[in-house]
Image: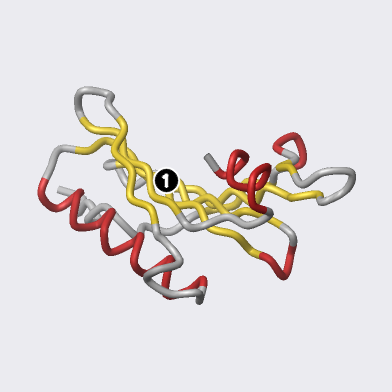
Amino acid sequence: MSRIMLQENNYVLPIGLLINSEDKVEIVIATLEISDQIQELVNHVQTGVTEKVNTGCFKASCMAYPDYENSAVVALLENAENYCATVIIPVVTEPQTKLVASDSEVLDGKCYIFPIKQDS
């Protein structure tokens, strides 16, 4: 989805993707009608994704947002077992704007969406 936004608009809006127990994807997307500030849009998506997780049976989530300062898209990956990663995907703008997935960097992530599981 980020790739399509880049090809058509040269900007990326934050989005959230969820996989439910039936392996169907649900989407939460921010729009410029909400705000033109990235952090406010990310907060909106995070709230929407968290609300969906709290009311349904979901296995995993991804929140993706642009990091314009570093010419990248950041993807926060998380599952219901609290495995998480932060993926930094570089963006090049010449000769056309596109993601360079082969140069992605995978870092340790944090739990933002799913409740923290307690050891029993």
Q: How is the image coloured?
A: secondary structure
Q: Secondary structure at mark 1?
A: strand
Q: Is residue 102 left or right of residue 28?
A: right
Q: Is residue 41 depicted above or below 92 in this figure?
A: below
Of 107 and 20, the residue lying toward us:
20
Q: What residue is pinned by disc 1?
A: 62
- List the single residue furthest toward the top: 22
Q: Position of residue 89 (x, y in %)?
A: 67, 47
Indicate the position of residue 28 as horizontal and vertical percent values. Answer: 33, 50
Answer with the quarter of the image where residue 10 lies.
Answer: bottom right
Residue name at image x 51 percent, y 71 percent: 38
Residue 20 drawn at (x, y percent) = 23, 32
Q: Residue furthest right?
A: 95
Dot 1 alpha-carbon crowd within 10 angstroms: few under 14, some 14 to 19, many 20 or more: many
Residue at position x 77%, y 47% in the image? 97
Residue under the image location 74 percent in, 50 percent down: 91
Of 40 and 111, nearer the camera is 40
Q: Quadrant of residue 22?
A: top left
At label 1, the amino acid type is Cys
Quarter of the view holding residue 81: top left
> Residue at (88%, 48%) from the top-left corner?
94
Q: In screen coordinates, is 105 left or right of 30?
A: right
> As displayed, is residue 89 above or below residue 102?
below
Residue 32: horizontal and vertical position, in percent?
45, 66
> Count the marks: how many?
1
